[in-house]
Image: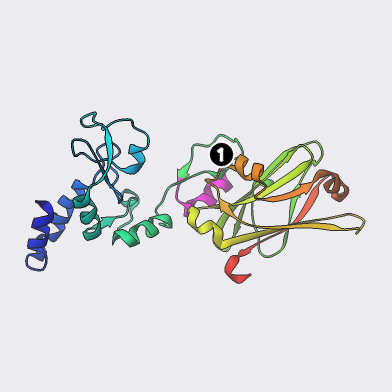
C-alpha cells in the first residue's frame, strides 16, 4: 500500500513527498538493529524480513521465530530503488540524502563517520571516539610522547629505538591531510612493518608506503613497497600473510646506528601520483 501511495503522489502532491518518503523508510528498518535493509532482502516463512547482517547472526526470525528462506522480498527491494536514504551518520551532523547507488559510496567516505583511536591497535587503552578531523588534536594531547606522532612530507626517517631489546613500536603520521599509523613488530627472525590508513577503509588503496633500511657500512639495502590498508584490518592476519614490509632481523641488525636505533627511510604517497 505504501508503494502504491508513493506512485500516486509522485509528481502531483510533491509537498507531501517527504512524509511519504519517511513512511517508506520506516518499512525498510530492520526490526533488530534499526538499520535500513538493503537488497538482497529475503523473507522468513511467515513473510518477515531483517537485514543481512542480523540474519547472519540469528537462527530464526526474531518476529515469529519462523525459519528463514531464500525467497526475495521484491516489494521492499523495489522501495529501496525508489527512495533516497539519509546518511547513517545523520546524528553526527551529515545532511546528505541520496539514492541507494550513491549513499553507500558516500557513507564509506563521510566526514561525519566516527572512528576509534588508532593506538588501540598497539594494545594501548584509549576510549576516545570521534571524527578523523579531530584525531590529530586527540593524539597530540593524549599520546604526546615524541615518538607517538609527527608530521611528515616526502622521504623521512622512521626510528625504532632499542632495536634488539624492544620488539614493538608504533607511530601516528600526518601527511597529505590524512592520518596514518605505522606499527612494527619483531616476530621470530623477522621485522614486520605495516602502515595503516586511518579513516574510511575504502580509501586505503589510494596510498602506498615505501620502507628502506640501509647497512651502516654501505654494503647493501633492502626496500619494500606496499599499499596501505585500513586500520580496521586485522594486523595479525596482515603479518601472518606477509602483506606488509618484511625484513630479516639478521640484516636489520647490521643497520642499527650508534644510538641503538634501526632507522628506516619511509615515504607515503598517493598511489595515483606513483
**Residue under the image location 71 percent in, 45 percent down:** 192
Whether 27 is drawn above or below 68: the answer is below
Q: Please report the bounds of the magenta region as a residue range.
A: 130-143
* Residue 180 spot, x, y in % from top left: 59, 53
**Residue under the image location 77 percent in, 44 percent down:** 161
* Residue 97 spot, x, y in % from top left: 28, 59
The residue that mark 1 highlights is 120
**Residue under the image location 27 percent in, 56 percent down:** 85
Whether 125 is drawn above or below 179: the answer is above
**Residue under the image location 37 percent in, 37 percent down:** 56
Tell me the SS state at disc 1. helix
> Quick one: quadrant of the C terminus?
bottom right
Q: Which of 123 and 65 lies nearest the eye of the viewer?
A: 65
Q: Is residue 114 visible?
A: yes
Q: How many marks?
A: 1
The chief SS type of the magenta part is: helix
Amino acid at each position: 500500500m505504501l508503494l502504491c501511495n508513493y506512485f500516486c503522489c509522485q509528481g502531483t502532491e510533491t509537498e507531501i513527498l517527504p512524509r511519504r518518503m519517511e513512511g517508506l523508510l520506516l518499512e525498510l528498518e530492520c526490526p533488530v538493529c534499526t538499520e535500513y535493509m538493503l537488497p538482497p532482502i529475503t523473507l522468513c516463512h511467515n513473510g518477515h524480513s531483517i537485514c543481512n547482517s542480523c540474519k547472519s547472526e540469528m537462527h530464526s526470525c526474531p518476529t515469529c521465530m519462523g525459519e528463514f528462506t531464500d525467497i526475495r522480498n521484491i516489494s521492499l527491494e523495489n522501495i529501496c530503488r525508489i527512495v533516497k536514504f539519509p546518511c547513517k551518520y545523520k546524528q553526527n551532523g551529515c545532511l546528505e540524502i541520496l539514492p541507494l547507488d550513491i549513499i553507500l559510496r558516500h557513507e564509506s567516505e563521510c566526514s561525519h563517520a566516527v572512528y576509534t583511536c588508532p593506538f588501540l591497535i598497539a594494545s594501548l587503552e584509549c576510549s576516545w571516539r570521534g571524527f578523523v578531523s579531530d584525531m590529530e588534536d586527540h593524539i597530540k594531547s593524549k599520546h604526546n610522547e615524541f615518538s607517538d606522532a609527527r608530521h611528515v612530507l616526502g622521504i623521512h626517517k622512521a626510528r625504532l629505538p632499542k632495536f634488539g631489546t624492544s620488539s614493538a613500536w608504533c607511530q601516528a603520521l600526518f601527511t597529505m591531510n590524512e592520518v596514518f599509523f605505522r606499527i612494527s613488530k619483531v616476530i621470530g627472525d623477522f621485522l614486520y612493518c605495516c602502515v595503516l590508513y586511518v579513516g574510511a577503509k575504502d580509501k586505503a588503496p589510494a596510498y602506498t608506503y615505501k620502507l628502506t633500511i640501509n647497512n651502516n657500512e654501505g654494503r647493501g639495502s633492502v626496500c619494500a613497497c606496499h599499499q596501505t590498508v585500513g586500520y580496521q584490518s586485522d594486523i595479525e592476519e596482515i603479518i601472518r600473510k606477509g602483506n606488509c614490509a618484511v625484513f630479516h632481523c639478521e640484516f636489520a641488525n647490521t643497520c642499527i646506528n650508534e644510538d641503538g636505533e634501526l632507522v628506516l627511510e619511509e615515504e607515503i604517497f598517493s598511489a595515483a601520483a606513483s
